[in-house]
Amino acid sequence: MAAFTYNLTIGIDVSAEFSYIAIIEPNGNVYKKVFKINHDLKGFNYLVQEIKKAEKDLSSKPAIFMESTGVYHIALFHYLKKFFNDVFIINPLITNSNKNSSIRKVKNDKKDAISIAHIGKFQNIKYSTDIDLDYYLLKSLVREYYKLRDDCSQYKKRLSADLRVIFPNYNTIFRNSNSKTSLAILNKYPSPLLIVKAPKDNIIDLLRDNARRSNEWCENIYLKLISVAEEAMAIGVDLDKLSIKIRANISLIKAINLEIKSLLESINNLIDSDELNSDIKENISLLKTIPGIGILTAITLVAEIGDFRRFKTSKHLVAFLGIDPSINESGNFKGSRNSLSKRGSSIGRRAIYTAALSSIGIKRNGEANNEIILEYYKDKLKTKKPKVALGAIMHKMVRYIFSVIKNKRPYEERHPKIHCRMYLNHTA
C-alpha cells in the first residue's frame, strides 16, 4: 500500500508560465474542478489558500506531487515547501508510463494533473523531497560549459567544411586547423588569393606573434601556406565571397572560447569558495584521486550525480548514468546485441566515457595511466570488440566512483587478486 493512500493529495502539472492543479480527497474523489494558476505571487498564494482550505474541510494533511520539468517546477516547489511538509517531485519517466493507462487515449494538462495526484496517492514510487541548490548551481554551470563546447564544435565543423570548398588541403598545414595561429591567419587572409597576394613579412610576423615559434618554423609554415594556396586557386571553387562566412565563424569561435574560459574560471572560483557545502568539495577531491579523472571530470560527475546517498549500490549508479545494458527478451528469444540503455544523464555518461578513455591511456614516458585498468581492457579485447571492452571499463570506473564516495577514502590502486585475498580474510 502506498504511503499516502488515505491522505489528501494534490497533483500539479507544471508548465513554463502556469500550472494545473488537481485535488483528490482521501477517499479518492475529486475535491474540486481542476484549476489553473499563473506562476506569479498571486497564483502561488491562491494555490496555498486552496490547499489549506481543503486540508481544513477534509481534516487531512496534504501530500503534494509535481513532475520534474526542467527548471519550471523549482520556484513553485520551494514556495510550497515554506507552507507544507510533504511536497514531492516525481521523475517524468514514472508519470509518462502511467498517463495513458486507460483505453481511451486522452492527453491534456487537466488530465495529467489528476494522473499525477493518483500516482502519488495510490502507487509506491520513488520521489525527491528536496532540491539542493548547491548541486543545482554547479550542475547549471557545468551544463552551460558543455553546451558552449558543443556550440563551438559546430562552428569549427562549418569552418572546416567551407575551407574544403575554397581552400582544399589547408588542414595539412597546421596540426590543428582551429588553433590560435591558424585562426589568426584565416581571419586576416580568409581566401587562397589573399594569402598569395599578402607580403611575406606580414604573414611571418603573424605566425611569430601567435605561435611564438622559431624563425625556421615560421618560414616552413609560410612556404606550405603559399604552396597550398596556389594549388587551391587551381582546384578549389572560386567563391571569394565565402570568406565573409569564414570570418563570421572565426569570430564566433573566438567569442565562445572566451566565454568558456570565463565560465571555467567561475566554476573553479565557486569550488574554491565557501559557498558550496563541504560534501561537494570532499567528493570532488576524492574523485580526483582516481586515475583518468581530472578536475573538470570530477566536477561534472559530482554535479550530475548529485547526492550520492540516493544510490544504495553501484548498480543503481550505473543505471542512473545509462550505461547498463538494455534487455531484449520475449519467450524463448533472448537478444544478444544489447546496447547501452542511455536513459540517464547524458553529460554524466560523457564524463565517464572521457574518464574511461583516459584510464586506458599511456603517458609520454610510456607508463600506463592505470596499469590495472589497462590490463583489464587488454584482457577484454581478447574476446570482445573495442566498444564493448570500453563499456566494461566504464562500468568499472563507476564502481570505483561509488566505492570511493561511499567509503570516503581516496582511490587505492590494487590488483584484483590482492583485493580478493583481502576480502576473503575480512569475511573469514
Image (tube, rainbow, N blue to C red):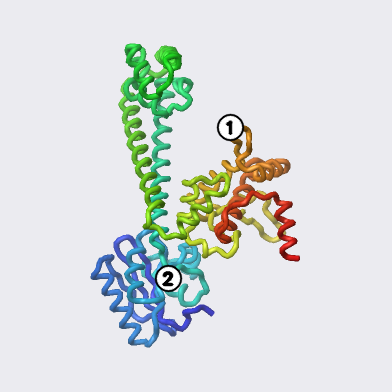
Tell me if I can see residue 277 in this picture. Answer: yes
Depth order, front residue of 211/4: 211
At x 49%, y 50%, the residue is 298
- 43 sits to left or right of 116: left
The residue mark sitting in front, 1 or 2, is 1
**Horizontal placement of 238 versus 378: left or right?**
left
Q: Residues within 10 Å of mark 2 (few under 14, many from 20)?
A: many
Toward which corner of the image does residue 426 lie, by quadrant?
bottom right
Real-space CA distance between mark 1 and mark 2, rounded to the nearest whole angstrom: 51 Å
User: Mark 1 highlights which residue?
Assistant: 364
Q: Quadrant of the C terminus?
A: bottom right
Amino acid type at image mark 1:
Arg
Q: Where is residue 77, by image quadrant?
A: bottom left
Amino acid bearing label 2: Phe
Q: Quadrant of the N terminus?
A: bottom right
Query: As displayed, is residue 180 above or below residue 219?
Result: below
Q: Nearer the viewer, residue 94 or 397?
A: 397
Q: Which residue is mark 2?
A: 88
Q: Residue furthest left?
A: 42
Q: Position of residue 259 (x, y in %)?
A: 34, 41
Q: Is residue 174 above or below residue 423?
A: above
Residue 235 in sight in this render: no
Q: Are marks 1 and 2 in contact (CB under 8 Å)?
A: no
What is the crowding at mark 1: few (fewer than 14 residues within 10 Å), some, or many (at least 20)? Answer: few
Nearer to me, 327 or 228:
228
What residue sits 60% from the left and 40% below the top?
369
Question: Where residue 389 sits in the image (x, y, percent)?
Answer: 65, 44
Q: Position of residue 210 (x, y in %)?
A: 37, 24
Please state if 286 lies on the left or on the right of 190 as rendered: right
